[in-house]
Image (cartoon, rainbow, N blue to C red):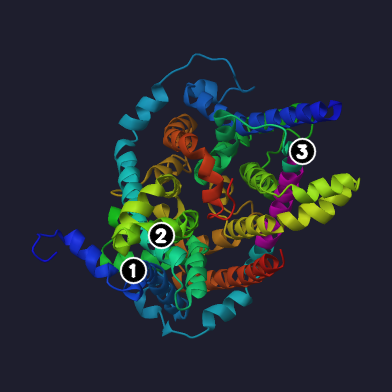
Amino acid sequence: MENNRKKVVIAIIIIGIILFVNILPFLWLILTSLKTRLDIFAIPPKFIFHSTWKNFISAFTKRNFLPMFYNSLIISACTTFLSLAVGTLGAYSLARFKLFGDKHISFWILSTRMFPPIVLVIPFFIMATRWGLHDSRLLLVIVYTTFNLPFVVWIMRSFFEDIPYDLEKAAMVDGYSRWDAFWKVVLPLSAPGLVTTAILCFIFSWNEFLFANVLTAAMAKTVPVGIRGLVTSRAVEWGEIAAVASLQVIPVLIFTFAVQKYIIRGLTLGAVKG
Amino acid sequence: MSGRHLSLFQRFGFWISSSENKFKWSLLLPTLILLALITVYPTIYAFNLALSDYNLARSADSLQGYIGLQNFREILKDPSFWSSLKTTIFFTVVVVSIEFFLGLAIALILQGTVTGSKIVRTIILLPMIMAPIVVGLIWTYLYQSEFGLVTFILRKIHIMSYESAPLARVGTALPSLMFVDIWQWTPFLIMVLLAGLEALPTAPYEAARIDKASPFLVFRKITLPLLKPVILIVLVLRIMDAIRVFDIVYALTEGGPGEATDVLSMFIYRSAFYLWGIGKASAISFILLYIIMIVSVILVNLLSRTKETV
């Protein structure tokens, strides 16, 4: 008993340290976003200061971040929808049926997920320039599907495998066709999996930087590219960077809070059921 | 059924369900075709680029077109490539080992003691779900030479002199970069390994308790073998991510100072989009792809072997 209590105390201390280390940079970001230029450059760094909304206002008036938020939202939503619409079907097929060479197919799909983006960004850049797709939202939707689609297939397959096959068999005995058994029985039961998958696809796309940085210039520019764009050789607008970055993190935080039970399962491609 | 009016969607449902073979393949084919179009085709395209003299900074008539393996030969003679390969391997090995051992130690301590609330879990997940470019920029700001918080603290406790900053020196830039990756991904390792530990069967532990086995023996003979599949999966994921790390490097150092933090992704990026040597950059990216393939085949083989024995 004594031993156990000691263990709990140590555990609480460790969790405290982790929370502190995790949240400090984030808090510092939020504090910076509320500081005036003068306070940002103060030495020693200031913890108490007069707060201002100036950075947020100038980010949207001077730096024009509203269209970038719109681009990020549209692109992330479209690629999420496309990947889910196509990938869910493939995942179900792989989860339920023995296919000719299905092990190789799964491995190939997984390997596309492991593809380094830097390998794909060069051909996409040349092709997009030749075909007049450079700096378009459509291009980013297609490119983001390269990592979202294999993700959907892998994680939804794991969620489908959790649902007992007997349920579909029973439905088919009751006169459901195979398609109806999938559409009306399996899909509603895997709703938590679908929501988690959608949220993770959205977050991956919302946070993506490398492809967006190379493949957009002005019209389709996304928020991460815009944030990095505030770093120039002449000056770094730390206040505005902090302001936009805090806004960019908010939806991610809300989504994570909502499905945190499944985040680890998602990030391990369904392998570890956290 | 034929008398009733059917929507297109219902017709699709009937058609697709008419035989099992038709059903399973028509569900899978859209994925396969789409994935082939958006990944295989660009890869073939990139391979063509890698075999040609293609440089956007030179005039078109000075380019020779198809040059076979010339690009690859040039890269293998380039000392910058070898130093960048070395940096990537060093970065991957150090970062993944520290994250793993730290994560495992903390997971073992936390196991079975506390069940975190929703808010606590979200904060622990925070670093891994933030945009890596934002993580990079936050730390650039914290490492800033004049007013950075980390720099300030390091100077106050006399670890660092007033003349230097973490990212400015060749000797400290790479460790500072590694620290950011470790900050970002150790919580992930903790959460995954904790989930793995909590899913282990209890029966072997009961037996060990009856036999009065020492904690170390229990860990080595029971916990480690049972946890092996989870450990391998999480190592595969982390190694793959560490080999292709880009965003935080781009935000923090862009490969500098000198070539101190020039990982392969950064090297390829600079070759392609600063120097516009598209052909050469594609060739390097294929070397990176090749390395990743070899590593993944080795790890996946290890993984399938343990699955059979456990």
For the record, the magenta segment spans B87-106
Chain containing the residue with disc 3: B
- Which of the two labelled residues, at mark 1 and mark 2, occupies the earlier sequence position? 1
What residue is shown with label 2?
A: A149
Q: Indicate the position of residue B174 as horizontal and vertical percent values.
A: 68, 50
Residue type (three-letter) at the residue carrying disc 3: Ile
Is residue B137 found inside the magenta-colored segment of the image?
no
Callout 3 secondary element: helix
Which label sits in the foreground, 1 or 2? 2
Report the front residue among B49 and B260: B49
Which numbered circle lies on residue A127? 1
Does residue B124 appear left or right of residue A258 in this picture?
Answer: right
**Can residue B63 be seen by looking at this rendering?**
yes
Q: Indicate the position of residue B198 as horizontal and vertical percent values.
A: 68, 44
| Distance of label 2 from label 3 (alpha carbons) | 37 Å
Count neighbours of disc 1 (C-alpha within 10 A) and say few if under 14, some if 14 to 19, many if 20 or more.
some
Query: Mark 2 and mark 1 in contact (Cβ < 8 Å)?
Result: no
| Distance of label 1 from label 2 (alpha carbons) | 21 Å
**Tags 3 and 1 on a common chain:** no
Query: Mark 3 and mark 2 in contact (Cβ < 8 Å)?
Result: no
Callout 2 secondary element: helix
Image point 58% across, 71% down: which residue? Answer: B293
Q: Which quarter shows the C terminus of chain B? A: bottom right
Count neighbours of disc 2 (C-alpha within 10 A) and say few if under 14, some if 14 to 19, many if 20 or more.
many
Residue type (three-letter) at the residue carrying disc 2: Leu
Does residue B101 appear left or right of residue A78 in this picture?
Answer: right
What residue is shown with label 3?
A: B109
Does residue B50 appear left or right of residue A77 in this picture?
Answer: right
Image point 36% across, 48% down: which residue? Answer: A188
Which label sits in the foreground, 2 or 3? 3
